[in-house]
Amino acid sequence: MDQDALRRRARAGLAAAPERAPARAHFRALGIDPARLEGPIVGVCSTWTGTMPCNLNQLELSRHVCDGVAAAGGVPLPFNTIAVSDNQSQGTPGMRASLVSREVIADSIELMTHAHDFDALVCLVGCDKTVPAALMALARLDKPAVVLYGGPMRAGPHNVTIQNVWEAVGAEERGLIDRAELDALERVACPSAGTCAGHFTANTMAVALDCLGIAVVGDGLVSAVDLGAKADAARRAGRLAVGPLPSARTFLDRRALLNAMAGIAATGGSTNGVLHLLAIAREAGVELTLDDLAEVAARTPVIASLAPSGRYVADDFHAAGGTRTLIRELAAARLIDGDAPTLAGRTLAEETADASEPDGEIVFTVERPFKTTAALAVLRGNLAPDGSLVKAAGAARSGHRGPARVFDSEEACADAVRAGLVQPGDVLVVRYEGPAGGPGMREMLSITSSVVGAGLGESVALVTDGRFSGATRGLMVGHVAPEAARGGPLAVVRDGDTISIDVDARSLRVELEDAELDRRLAIWTRPELPYATGVFGRYRALVGSASEGAVLRNGVA
């Protein structure tokens, strides 16, 4: 029998059919009158964890969402899934779990929805992987849904953020500051619950949510510690979820994903945003390529001055009009399709028509942008036939040519930087850190922050098949595909080979003759890599290329 028909039959009997009496007994144990089960049942997914500040407010927000669902006549069923702290795992083997967690979270939401047959969902998200994971699950399920971002933390004094702490580590290693100065910064950089205050990956994805239309525009970047406004946003999300709402793929089609890319580019957002949009597209069955996203980035100026490539933090951005002002400006310039729908039933253009004007300091006009150059660029060449990503907005230069210093792990490179063994002009090559190689495609913030903190940010470049944190600055090229562990050219680069990076020409090359590169690849064998069993072993076997979003395949990759 058709599975949807079976599901409908089971649901039709939930409120009164004899065969569903055991299920009703469980609902009674929850304090839910079975008579209410005739109405909408809304799954309220929290990504709360007590292991980090990023999602710490979500249990409270979940209660407010449930209140909103109940007030609108629905039955809220709250549940929880995991989240991984990128900051706490950064520079450690634990960072391998970060990207893997995206798939686990998505699977968890999908499984709970199939098991409990929710009519709609509210997903509470925050730190880096929870936003794309929720969207990937919603793309698979295609149920009506509302996504609410938990909100950023406040910055420390003088707008210091976790980025400043990481870079101060590099400065302290080189003796440029003393330990007392580092300790003082550590104490004030993260003063509250919420996601990192700068425009790193989490807040990048919060902007993407608003541009997709699957969140109430403007609610996400309300600070996590603005308790009254955040509670109002949560209740609003709960009421909306009772419906009627279109299903999730309405907000995850090609137009919506390109709109999200424009928002990411216009705010100088994280390269991780590209990886996640590609993954969401795969789950939604949408044709979308790395080059499609690069084309959007190329035509979109940066119109917000946000750390790390600008001066301001999420609180400042929100106070200056935030995503509402950003979307209105981009829609007016036709850089975003303003006819795309929103949860409110209005178009993006209609929903943001009353947004405040750009202030010219935090949010700029398209005609007079903060930066005219593209925030993100895809580089190709004999080192990255399938593409690589550079955050051009975070680099003060558009090119570099120098000798390769090759490392087969993040730790080996970090140790060399900290020992003062890296010289101006070097190109650091970190390989076997891709989706399969790592496994898990670790971020390289421990390296990039040490390079910048040591004063080498303008003289050293980095090339890797791993990822970068949204807090990364400098000329750093990541997501190199094919990755080294799958026989990509990065696997055969040697110390002293000359590597050229040209962002303007969109080129990444090792200066070798094709015949020499082919000869090296023909004799290459993959080294033994860590974590062959368990969740990491399964992930290595099934994960696809970063150029396609590093999604898991239904079979061997």
Image (cartoon, helix red, strand yellow):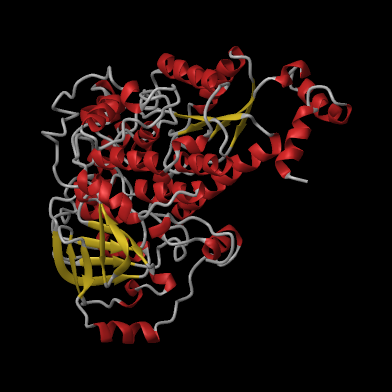
Residue drawn at (62%, 32%) of the image: 79
156 lies left or right of 64: left
Residue drawn at (41%, 62%) of the image: 434
* Viewer can see residue 421: no
- The percent coordinates of residue 396 (x first, y second) are 13, 50
The vertical placement of 219 against 511, above or below, is above
The vertical placement of 150 against 81, above or below, is above
Looking at the image, how many numbered discs can be counted on the residues?
A: 0
- The percent coordinates of residue 324 (x first, y second) are 30, 25
Foreground residue among 318 and 313: 318
* Residue, far left: 368
The vertical placement of 237 against 171, above or below, is above
The vertical placement of 505 against 360, above or below, is below
* Viewer can see residue 405: yes
- The percent coordinates of residue 98 (x first, y second) are 46, 50
Residue drawn at (58%, 21%) of the image: 242
Foreground residue among 541 and 227: 541
Foreground residue among 271 and 176: 271
- The percent coordinates of residue 173 (x first, y second) are 24, 53
Residue drawn at (50%, 46%) of the image: 284
Foreground residue among 201 and 12: 12
358 lies left or right of 72: left
* Residue, far right: 18
**Location of residue 232 (image quadrant):** top left
